[in-house]
Image (tube, helix red, strand yellow):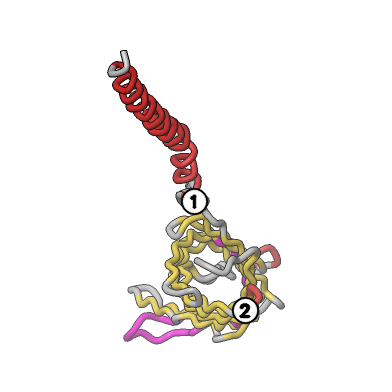
């Protein structure tokens, strides 16, 4: 019995030590497992959030311009077996204004208004090699243009944009006084026109800008009197320089 008690004490002591050690290890493992979800949430929350990128919207560019134009018209000569006809317009300066909207680089339109004063001249003479009487007239006229153009443009830089246009409209000739054989009802003449042109816009601060542009207008001369046998076709060259203002223009293009 005396020998059994010391052995029992040693066994009890060893079991107690093992029990204490296992409880300590078990508690640490439980703490580690309970802490892992919080740590993972901290990792997730600390990771950068990627912003959602929406579909970009198209920026509509709306502008108006006012400037000056130079009217330079090619003279035309028509020599037939019956007569020699010449028609011309004297060079002149005028004003030109536009309202323009561009929805995309390749999709836009422009409404154009122009005014100048010029003298329309025509003459009728016998054909080459014949003699006879030459008749004609010089008619000072107001010239009004109303047209619409299709616009395609390309932004080269934040300051420089090139564009092209094609369109149609009407040129009205209103005689300032009747000269020669112009009847009263013929003092006003309306001519359909075709338009083709190109130009460049240069951006300035505060939405302002400069526009240099060339426009070619294709039309027939006005038909002022019954003695003029034919209406010749011509090209009116109109270089112009304008000051523009663009509404709601952003800093980037």
Residue 8 colored magenta? no
Q: Which residue is mark 2?
A: 205
Quadrant of the frame with the N terminus: top left
Labelled disc at residue 190: none
Helix, strand or loop at mark 2: helix
| 2 or 1: mark nearer the eye | 1
Whether residue 120 sits left or right of residue 25 in the image: it is: right
CA–CA distance between discs 2 and 1?
A: 25 Å
Whether residue 97 sits left or right of residue 41 in the image: it is: right
The image quadrant that residue 148 belongs to is bottom right
Give 189 or 103, whichever is nearer the viewer.
103
Magenta residues, start to end: 110-134
Badge 1 crowding class, 10 Å Cα cut-off, few under 14, some 14 to 19, many 20 or more, is few
Give 102 or 174, whichever is nearer the viewer.
102
Tell how many labels.
2
Position of residue 244 relative to residue 248, above or below, is: below
Helix, strand or loop at mark 1: loop
The main secondary structure of the magenta stretch is: strand
Percent across and percent down for residue 112 are 59, 65
Query: Are the residues flagged by discs 2 and 1 in contact, CB closer than 8 Å?
Result: no
Give 41 or 184, whichever is nearer the viewer.
41
Q: Earlier in the sequence, mark 2 or mark 1?
A: 1
Labelled disc at residue 56: 1
Q: Is residue 122 visible to us here?
A: no
Q: Which residue is depicted at the point 48% across and 68% down?
A: 220
Percent across and percent down for residue 206 are 66, 76
Q: Which residue is depicted at the point 56% across and 67% down?
A: 226
């Amino acid at each position: 019995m005396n020998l059994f008690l010391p052995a029992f004490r040693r066994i009890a002591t060893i079991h107690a030590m093992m029990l204490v050690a296992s409880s300590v290890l078990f508690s640490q493992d439980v703490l580690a497992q309970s802490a892992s979800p919080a740590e993972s949430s901290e990792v997730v929350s600390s990771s950068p959030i990627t912003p959602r990128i929406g579909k970009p919207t198209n920026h509509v560019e709306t502008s108006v311009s006012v400037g000056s134009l130079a009217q330079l018209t090619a003279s035309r000569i028509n020599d037939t077996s019956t007569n020699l006809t010449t028609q011309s317009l004297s060079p002149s300066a005028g004003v030109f204004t536009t309202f323009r909207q561009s929805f995309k680089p390749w999709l836009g339109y422009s409404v154009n208004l122009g005014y100048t004063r010029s003298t329309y001249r025509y003459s009728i003479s016998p054909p080459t090699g014949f003699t006879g009487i030459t008749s004609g007239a010089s008619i000072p006229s107001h010239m009004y243009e109303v047209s619409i153009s299709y616009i395609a443009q390309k932004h080269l830089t934040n300051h420089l944009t090139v564009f092209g246009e094609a369109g149609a409209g009407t040129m009205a000739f209103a005689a300032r006084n009747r000269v020669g054989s112009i009847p009263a009802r013929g003092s006003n003449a309306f001519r359909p026109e075709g338009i083709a042109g190109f130009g460049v816009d240069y951006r300035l601060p505060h939405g302002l800008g400069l526009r240099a542009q060339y426009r070619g207008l294709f039309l027939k001369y006005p038909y002022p009197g019954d003695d003029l046998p034919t209406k010749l076709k011509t090209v009116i060259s109109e270089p112009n320089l304008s000051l523009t203002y663009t509404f709601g223009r952003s800093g980037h293009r």
